[in-house]
Amino acid sequence: MLSRDTSPEMEQRQIERWRQMTAAEKLRLVGMLRASVLQLAGTGVRMRFPEAGEREVFLRVAELALGPALARKAYPEIDWPA
């Protein structure tokens, strides 16, 4: 059982659909899911830091996605406390 809120029959149908998907379809799905996650993360950052500009939102999402240490190596301009 993958999900507590999904019936076993529907879960099996979903698994079968994943098995039928080509690699390109799976990659496209993962890309769409990634974009959704980043959009949600950006929304969360904007809610916590309403005064933040777009660059700060981007950097704070990067920090969430990469972790503070790697984000600060990739983006040395991050200057708020870890």
Image (cartoon, grey):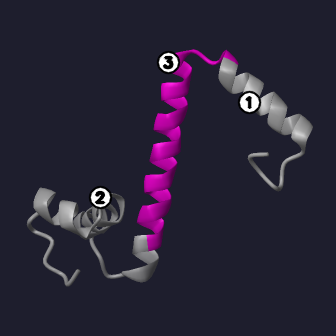
Instruction: Identify the mark at residue 15; answer none if there is no mark.
Output: 1
Q: Nearer the viewer, mark 1 or mark 3?
A: 1
Judge left or right: residue 28 versus residue 46.
right
Seen at 74% across and 46% down, the residue is: 2
Closer to the chain start, of discs 3 and 2, is 3
Seen at 10% across and 68% down, the residue is: 77
Contact, mark 1 vs mark 2 (Cβ under 8 Å): no
Residues in magenta? 20-44
Q: Amino acid at mark 2?
A: Leu
Question: What is the magenta segment's predominant secondary structure?
Answer: helix
| Residue located beneath label 2 in the image | 66
Q: Amino acid at mark 1?
A: Ile
Q: Quadrant of the C terminus?
A: bottom left
Q: Position of residue 3 (x, y in %)?
A: 77, 51
User: Cα distance, mark 1 to mark 2?
Assistant: 30 Å
Closer to the chain start, of discs 1 and 2, is 1
| Residue located beneath label 3 in the image | 24
User: Cα distance, mark 3 to mark 2?
Assistant: 26 Å
Judge left or right: residue 12 versus residue 39.
right
Secondary structure, mark 1, is helix
Determine crowd level at label 3: few under 14, some 14-19, many 20+ residues with C-alpha closer than 10 A.
Answer: few
Contact, mark 1 vs mark 3 (Cβ under 8 Å): no
